[in-house]
Image (tube, rainbow, N blue to C red):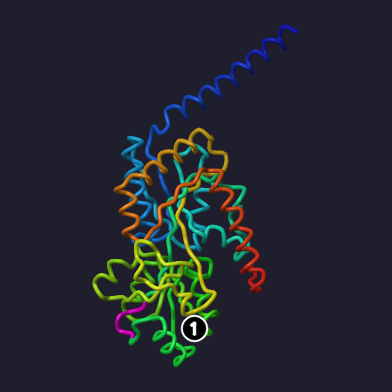
Amino acid sequence: MTFIFNALRSLTALTLAAFTAVALAQTNYPSRPIKIVVPYAAGGGADQVTRLMGLRLADRLKQSVVIDNRGGGSNTIGMAMVAKAPADGYTLGLVTPTFLMTQSMMKNHPYDIIKDFSAVAMFGDAPLFLVIPSSLPANNMKEFLQYAKARQGQLNWASGGTTSTQGLAGLMFSSAAGLKTTQIQYKGSSQGMTDLLAGRVQFMFNPLPSIIAHTKSGALKILGVASAERLSAYPEIPVIADTVPGFSTAGWFALVAPAGTPKEIIDRLNREINDIIKTPEVRASMIESGLEPKTMSPAEFEKMMNVDFVKYTKIFAEAGVTPQ
């Protein structure tokens, strides 16, 4: 009996020690650099907004925030790293709607979108803009549609793949507009932008951070925004649906963590990020870059992802898309 009592006491002590260690680690969080995996190539809109938030987060947490670009595999290369990382708050992942699409499109998917991740925080919406090279003889949506319909099957457009927001937007736009076009897939928006600027592809959907410098220089022309309504910061940009009825889509940027990350750490990150987004300078920077700042609690963000995951799964099923 004494042996059993001593064994139970030792086990209890070990359990309490483990819980104390976890609690201490959470209290001292972060005690080393945090890594944010961006499943896109460097230089694109996702990379830019993550670096903006990473710098501010590092200032508030008094710890380095490292951005690790892992493009390719329709986001799955980078997000697989996040899914397999320790659930300790030191590895996070940048996600967009693409994150919720890939499981419907790929066989042998390397992780479960819903079960393997915890929602952390929303950065904001990323309206998509239709852009063309300035060399194309079209200055508005009506002229571009006339140009495209006169060249059915000849126009190419850039995307990060069918499982990207760009890919979904391009397919929906071509279908709604009655155009026969060819999708050219890239590992990241920056590579697609290079070919767009060179005229090797004729149009592309992208968030404003990726295109604003090129539109200001005159290299690209914005024909419209894919949102349902005009943007308050850019009311002069027309809505594509005015010319192509029924067409609208949007993107967003947010953070997730490996499933099982302690709630205290997730809540801390959520508070810090929400406070960053509410600062006037960050809001102004985001709006100027064509983003719509938005804050959510982890529960709100998780609910949104669950709803959108079901929606995208249904869209692909109805379209007859099968995992490849």
User: Which residue is drawn at the image coordinates 66% and 73% (left, top)?
Assistant: 320
Give the dominant element type of the magenta stretch: helix, strand or loop.
loop
User: Relative to residue 112, is residue 290 depicted above or below?
Assistant: below
Q: Which residue is mark 1?
A: 181
Q: Is residue 246 left or right of residue 135?
A: right
Residue extending furthest right? 1
- The picture quadrant where one finds residue 253 is bottom left
- The picture quadrant where one finds residue 191 is bottom left
The amino acid pointed to by label 1 is Thr
Residue extending furthest top? 2
The boundaries of the magenta stretch are: 132-136
Image quadrant where one finds the C terminus:
bottom right
Q: Is residue 165 or residue 69 the one in the foreground? A: 165
Is the residue marked by circle 1 packed among few (<14), some (14-19), or many (20+) residues within 10 Å?
many
Q: Position of residue 159 (x, y in %)?
A: 45, 71
Q: Position of residue 37 (x, y in %)?
A: 43, 51
User: Which residue is drawn at the image coordinates 41% and 45% (left, top)?
Assistant: 35
Q: Position of residue 1 (x, y in %)?
A: 75, 8
Q: Position of residue 93 (x, y in %)?
A: 47, 49
Q: Is residue 163 or residue 177 the one in the foreground? A: 177
Q: Is residue 301 left or right of residue 8?
A: left
User: Which residue is drawn at the image coordinates 40% and 56% (left, top)?
Assistant: 292
For label 1, the SS is strand
